[in-house]
Image: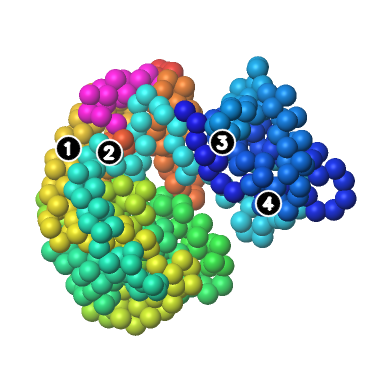
């Protein structure tokens, strides 16, 4: 089926030389590298000549040569279309051909070496125990489709000006109500800033709170992108150990800021006790510090009622609460939020405006509709039941197949389970993960999330794997453990 050319065609023809040759070479290269796709119709010779400011005969000569070589095909009464010479496969990518040089423009030294395949587009794998991935099959497609359609018909796209950097008021009201009811967060819409996922929230907070040379504390093992971000901002980042009860508050240094995941420590899964939460606030008060509370997957709980967030216990306005819809909905929506003390909101609004001005208003409007209608709460309830079954199944399979080598860390929330070696058992987590990958099983070794050596174990996510695949996936993982650690 033929189609019109999807874009304007520009040919660089300035300077001396044969212009027909330049048009020929440019169009030929565009066909070969996929910018011009098979079946696309090219502009008529008269039209392209007018666009380029050359004679019609110049374009006709180029077209005739390309047609003779098989790159184009002329159809009487229809026009000229892209073809490919016999034996040349259609290009996979539509990107222009490389210019050849590696590039003289280099990033600042602090940005070199940060690219990590862990955060790249995932490749299909038979048994995917990836961490932090919700199940797209559970996404409320029908409710979302209706909400987006309504947003497209509404006033969101008819505005002639940019939207509020803090986010649409309707969404901020919905978020404040949701976290107030579901998580007992004490806030109003005026204290909410909508972000492009939790990662932008951390970026905005780092920009507004941290100056080069400031000491900041992070959990170890913990979430690498936060540590890397703070280092890029010039902070002196101090890793602080965690145990089965979360962050070791007693080991915190004097610091400007601490990043913590109290409800479900990432990656081990411990819950920060009420005693430690109180001690954390005492520490923050003593050091005039700020606490960033990342409540990244608190919607999915499988045990007793969660403790009140640290933000709820804060009487001084030192705690900043960060949430995201990436785990409860889909990461691709890029929706997160900050609940900040009023003293920080103006700076965060300015940082958001200078970063990307504001989030997509259609997505914001659709999410607000789901919150208002109760569809989001219904989705979370349905998804929680599914994830609770997978959580229990992984726990049983791991206990049966990996006993004596790995033990599950008790966990009552989230989308993954941490397995750590039994005391005194040597274990090479990276080797196991590599061996498992060969067998078609994706798991993450805990050392990838640690700064200091000594943290071993594996993370098994259950958002991206169907329940019926968990037993076989766990069996293959156990076989990989046996191959790498015989005896």
Give the SS element for disc 4: helix
Residue at the spot of label 3: 41
Q: Are marks 1 and 3 in contact (CB under 8 Å)?
A: no
Q: Nearer the viewer, residue 33 or 334?
A: 33
Secondary structure mostly seen in magenta is helix
- Please say which color scheme the image uses: rainbow
Q: Is residue 164 visible?
A: yes
Question: In whole angstroms, how far apart are the C-alphas of marks 1 and 3?
Answer: 49 Å
In the rendered image, the residue lying farthest to the right is: 16
Question: Does residue 100 belong to the magenta stretch?
Answer: no
Identified at 35% across, 48% down, the residue is 331
Residue placed most toward the observer, 459 or 96: 96
* Above or below for 436 versus 443: above
Nearest to viewer (mark 2 / mark 4) = 4
Image height check: is 134 above or below 259?
Answer: above
| Residue 303 visible in rendering | no
Q: Is residue 380 above or below residue 404?
A: below
Mark with earlier residue (2, 1): 2
Residue 135: which disc? 2
Q: Tell me the magenta residue range.
A: 465-481
Residue 449: percent from left, percent from top: 44, 46
Tell me the quadrant of the picture where the C terminus can be found.
top left
Circle 2/circle 1 CB separation < 8 Å: yes
């Amino acid at each position: 089926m033929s189609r019109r050319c999807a874009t304007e065609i520009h040919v660089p023809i300035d300077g001396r030389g044969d212009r027909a040759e330049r048009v020929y070479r440019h169009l030929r290269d565009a066909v070969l590298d996929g910018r011009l796709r098979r079946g696309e119709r090219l502009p008529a010779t008269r039209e392209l000549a007018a666009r380029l400011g050359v004679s019609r005969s110049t374009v006709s000569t180029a077209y005739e040569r390309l047609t003779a070589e098989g790159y184009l095909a002329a159809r009487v009464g229809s026009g000229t279309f892209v073809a490919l010479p016999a034996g040349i496969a259609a290009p996979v990518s539509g990107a222009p051909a490389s210019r050849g040089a590696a590039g003289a423009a280099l990033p600042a030294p602090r940005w070199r070496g940060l690219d990590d395949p862990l955060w790249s587009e995932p490749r299909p794998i038979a048994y995917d125990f990836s961490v932090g991935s919700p199940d797209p099959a559970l996404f409320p497609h029908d409710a979302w489709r209706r909400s987006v359609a309504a947003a497209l018909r509404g006033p969101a796209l008819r505005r002639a000006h940019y939207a509020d950097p803090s986010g649409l008021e309707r969404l901020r009201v919905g978020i404040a109500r949701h976290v107030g009811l579901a998580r007992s967060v004490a806030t109003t819409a005026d204290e909410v800033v909508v972000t492009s996922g939790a990662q932008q929230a951390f970026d905005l907070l780092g920009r507004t709170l941290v100056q080069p040379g400031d000491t900041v504390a992070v959990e170890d093992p913990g979430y690498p992108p936060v540590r890397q971000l703070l280092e890029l901002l010039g902070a002196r980042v101090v890793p602080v150990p965690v145990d089965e009860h979360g962050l070791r508050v007693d080991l915190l240094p004097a610091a400007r800021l601490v990043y913590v995941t109290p409800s479900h420590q990432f990656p081990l899964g411990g819950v920060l006790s009420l005693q430690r939460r109180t001690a954390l606030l005492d520490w923050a008060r003593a050091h005039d510090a700020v606490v960033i509370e990342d409540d990244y997957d608190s919607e999915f709980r499988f045990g007793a009622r969660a403790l009140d967030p640290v933000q709820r216990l804060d009487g001084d306005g030192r705690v900043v609460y960060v949430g995201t819809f990436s785990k409860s909905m889909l990461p691709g929506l890029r929706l997160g939020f900050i609940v900040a003390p009023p003293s920080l909101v103006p700076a965060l609004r300015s940082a958001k405006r200078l970063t990307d001005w504001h989030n997509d208003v259609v997505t914001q409007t659709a999410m607000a509709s789901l919150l208002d209608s109760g569809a989001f709460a219904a989705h979370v309830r349905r998804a929680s039941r599914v994830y609770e079954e997978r959580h229990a199944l992984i726990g049983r399979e791991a206990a049966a197949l990996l006993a004596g080598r790995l033990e599950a860390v008790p966990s009552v929330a989230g989308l993954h389970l941490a397995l750590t070696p039994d005391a005194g058992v040597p274990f090479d987590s990276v080797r196991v993960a590599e061996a498992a990958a060969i067998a078609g099983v994706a798991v993450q070794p805990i050392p990838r999330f640690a700064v200091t050596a000594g943290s071993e174990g594996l993370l098994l996510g259950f958002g991206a794997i169907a329940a019926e695949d968990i037993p076989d996936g766990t069996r293959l993982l156990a076989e990989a453990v046996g191959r790498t650690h015989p005896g």
